[in-house]
Amino acid sequence: MSQTVKVPRYALLKKRSRWRRRFFILLVVWIITSLFSSFPTTRGLLAYPLYVHEGDASGDAAYVMADGYAYWERVHAASDLYHMGRVPRVIVLAEDEPAGFNFVQNKTETRLQRTVAYLEWLGVPTEDISTVRVESAGMFGSLNEARTVADQETKLQRLVVVTSAPHTRRTQFCFRRTLPPHIQLQVYAASPPSQSHEIDAPLWIEYIKLLVYYVIV
């Protein structure tokens, strides 16, 4: 005949108290991290290890890294380099994806058409805008762009790559692994980490991407 073992009431209360305490600690930690990470300055500090910026960058051309909702921020920064006399031309990726309807011209524009129009509006002449085209898409977008520039811009001696602050270290890694050794590479962040449009994106994803690039490339 089996006997039912009764657990003392104080032991049950102690166990419940321990789990409540752990839950409360986790809740407090989550609230604190969520609260502090909502401030741009804090997120800028979290992004700082990803950040590479050469403020006096200059070269034969500035290449604007494509994609992302901060793309126009990068285009603007490239135009600034042009007007400061740091680069004589701007290189962009020839993207044929639709980028919205132009009501003035009454037609749908591609990403490339809108980019060229924006650069012209910023004062960069059409003859000083160059394009490169990715022949085949792949999983590693930044690496594909770096290979495209290396293959299609063979006369470069000095290149400035413009991208968003959280992407600068990964971009630098891709281009250093791809460009010929004689090409001088400089990376220019479109804005400081705490002011970048990309600062609102999950930063842990960028850390994982950087790790994957280091392991695979």
Image (cartoon, rainbow, N blue to C red):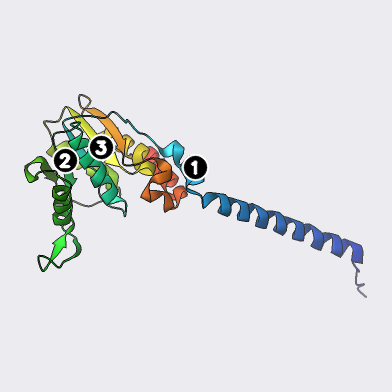
- If you read the primary sequence from the N terminus, does the residue marked by circle 3 or circle 1 appear first? 1
Please state if 165 lies on the left or on the right of 116 as rendered. right
Residue type, mark 2 in image: Val
* Residues at marks 2 and 1, CA–CA distance in whole angstroms: 31 Å
Residue closest to the eye, 136 or 206:
206
Please state if 42 lies on the left or on the right of 130 as rendered. right
Q: Which residue is the site of mark 2?
A: 90
Q: Which residue is the site of mark 3?
A: 161
Total labels drawn = 3
Residue at point 44%, 46% (across, down): 208
Of all residues shown, which one is farthest toward the left? 127
In the structure shown, which secondary structural element does the residue marked by tag 2 occupy? Answer: strand
Quadrant housing the N terminus: bottom right
Residue 17 visible in this rendered orientation of the protein: yes
Where is residue 7? Give x, y as percent.
Answer: 89, 66
Q: Are marks 3 and 1 in contact (CB under 8 Å)?
A: no
Residue 145 position by quadrant: top left
